[in-house]
Image (cartoon, rainbow, N blue to C red):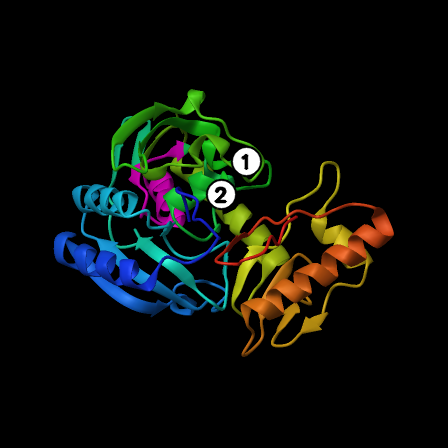
Amino acid sequence: MRGIKPDPGAPADRGSLEKAAAEICAEVQGRCLLSEPLSRHTSFGVGGPAAIYVYPADKAALSKLLMLCHDRSLAVLIIGYGNNLLVSDDGFAGCVVDLSSALNGMAVEGNRLTAGAGVMLNDVIRCTADHGLTGMERLAGIPGGVGGGMSMNCGAFGAHISDHLAELEVMNPNGEFMTLAGSGIEFGYRSAPGLADKVVLQAVFQLDGDRMDNVNRLIDETVAERRRRNVMTLPSAGSTFKNPRGFSAARLLEQVGAKGMRMGGVEVSPLHANFIVNSGGGTAEDIVALISKLREKVYKRFNIDLKLELRAVGFDYEIDA
């Protein structure tokens, strides 16, 4: 998921929302759905309906859509594959823009790899292996797309998606295109403050050349280690909390007995203490309640306030206060 931060406050007036929906469906090229359950589009499998849900056909359609939403003061949520996302059971009273079926081109020229925001990150990793390009192997196995990965500066094993970023094509809330140098964008640990109000369209990575067998070996080692640590068979959004400076969130949670803790239809994975899984019929409220309980336990024992790595959307209260 990426880009424009939705307003979690009061929902839009119903009449205005219906008028905006009719205008969007008529004027934006692509597919437009109304009252679409977000549980169908998130890896957690929870979330109420989006008032408007749009698959824009291309960049021009996306620009038109964002301009319409801006003019109508309609809250916007950009998603790709719904990983790292917790949506309220009440849903999202605005326009959800799904880029998973658009912006999915990829090309290699020399040591530069260009990938659209809708390209799966694992497809990028496979492409680097096919072309003997090194630098992104440690990202192998991370779910989701390029755009979502950029918006949270995803990473693993000491590597981050921003490490080899040469430039980024983005769009602002007014639907205007911009190209940003990678070195000029502010990135943080599991965050990208420099992209807070922007939609990622396309990323260009500057990589180094290496033998294909070397690249493939490091990819295989990374995937094997990821599977050893994070084997998941149930719906999840991956890591729930960021690692506090100098600590492992999973280790802190393990020490307070988090593994196997339940709340309604969700539980902490018995395989990884920083993963919450939907074990059947779980709701967003179940997840929020379990998050609160886990944070309370860690704070009480270690005086450490865990911060969310996943993003919460559509709630009328602050979860990560």
Depth check: 167 or 312 in front?
312
The correct choice, above or below, for 267 with respect to 299 in the image is below
| Horizontal side, residue 63 vs residue 215: left or right | left
Q: Is residue 135 visible?
A: no
Q: Residues within 10 Å of mark 2 (few under 14, many from 20)?
A: many
- Where disc 2 sits, the SS reads helix
Q: Is residue 51 magenta?
A: no
Depth check: 49 or 107 in front?
49
Image location of residue 33, percent across then percent down: 25, 65
Q: Is residue 175 visible?
A: yes
Q: Residues within 10 Å of mark 1 (few under 14, many from 20)?
A: some
Contact, mark 2 vs mark 1 (Cβ under 8 Å): yes
Q: Quadrant of residue 182?
A: top left
Which mark is on residue 139?
A: 2
Q: Is residue 119 magenta?
A: yes
Depth check: 98 or 34 in front?
34
Q: Quadrant of residue 132?
A: top left
- Where disc 1 sits, the SS reads strand
Which mark is on residue 159?
A: 1
Q: Residue at x 79, y 53 (%)?
A: 298
Q: Residue furthest bottom?
A: 281
| Horizontal side, residue 233 vs residue 183: left or right | right
Image location of residue 165, percent across then percent down: 41, 28
Type of the residue with mark 2: Leu
Region rendered in magenta:
115-133
| Horizontal side, residue 58 vs residue 37: left or right | left
Image location of residue 23, percent across then percent down: 17, 56
Image location of residue 307, percent across then percent down: 66, 47
Q: Residue at x 50, y 63 (%)?
A: 88
In space, the residues marked 2 and 1 are separated at their CA atoms by 7 Å
Depth check: 246 or 288 in front?
288
| Horizontal side, residue 85 vs residue 15: left or right | right
